[in-house]
Image (cartoon, grey):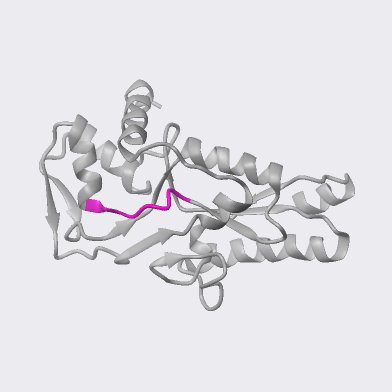
Amino acid sequence: NILEASRKNNVQKLVYTSSIGAYSNAEIFIESKNNEGTPMDTFPGWAKRMAELQIKAYKKQYGLDWSIVRPCNVYGPGDNFDPDNAMVIPSLMMRIYKGENPLSVWGDGSAIRDFAFSRDVAKGIILALHHGTRGDFVNLGSGKGVTIKELLKELNYFLDFNYEFDSTKSSGFSRRVMDIRRAQDWIKYKPSTSLQEGLKETWDWFQEHKDE
């Protein structure tokens, strides 16, 4: 409905926010690879891919050169902190706030993830709107792999809590990191927030708004 309304109203600039979950499983996600086969996040991933194809169809049929971005694990102020369904960073923060001692973390801490701060990703979306993504999509991540153990150490730098790993539970995929060279080249994307800076800003926002 949004795409058709945009076509009818001659909207020239539009950004569709897809997801890392649209990729098939891999350790490093590069735009030109891992787009065949079943997406990692099966049904949500297929939904994202179908919308990407719709945008490509509008370009082919109507010449509308709209943009597509695939963000990774985005975190930051305004996040969902419900530990029952939140992503890893806000979930850990809520459990730390509630005083879980020691904090039990699934796996052995060796799993590697790409965590992107929300402000950096927001800037990337604006850059994609401005520059366009050439009838394709670009990754929006930090481009850096961080182990869960390193993540906990960064949190421990400014928060006093104990934690332990539960190696009887799965760590999930061993490595999931985005290659952001295309975004750096095509849309001048430059994520600038360090993990510690992003975590501290997210925690401070959470402390001010935890009742929400």
Q: Residue 96 sits in which quadrant?
A: top left
Q: Residue at x 46, y 53 (%)?
A: 72
**Residue at the image position 38 percent from the left and 24 percent from the top:** 209
Would you say the magenta stretch is mainly helix, strand or loop?
loop
Residue 163 occupies which quadrant of the picture?
top left
Task: Report the residue at 36% width, 28% height from top.
Answer: 201
Q: Is residue 129 visible?
A: yes
Residue 1 seen in the current view: no
Q: Residue furthest bottom?
A: 37
Up/down of 178 relative to 79, above or below: below
- Residue 192 x/y as whole percent: 44, 37
Residue at the spot x=19%, y=61% of the render? 107
Instruction: Report x, y in % for residue 111.
Output: 26, 60
State the image coordinates of residue 108 (x, y, percent, origin top left).
Answer: 16, 60
Image quarter in which the C terminus is found:
top left
Residue found farthest to the front:
185
Specify whether 2 is left or right of 28: right
97 sits left or right of 38 in the view: left
Asked whether, in this view, residue 134 is left or right of residue 118, the answer is right
Considering depth in this image, is 78 or 175 the residue closer to the camera? 175
| Residue 166 lies in the magenta-colored region | no
Q: Which region of the structure is painted magenta? A: 141-148
Residue 113 x %, y %: 34, 56
The answer to whether 84 appears left or right of 53 in the picture is left
| In the image, residue 146 lies in the stretch drawn in magenta | yes
- When asked about the image quadrant of residue 134, the answer is bottom right
Q: How many marks?
A: 0
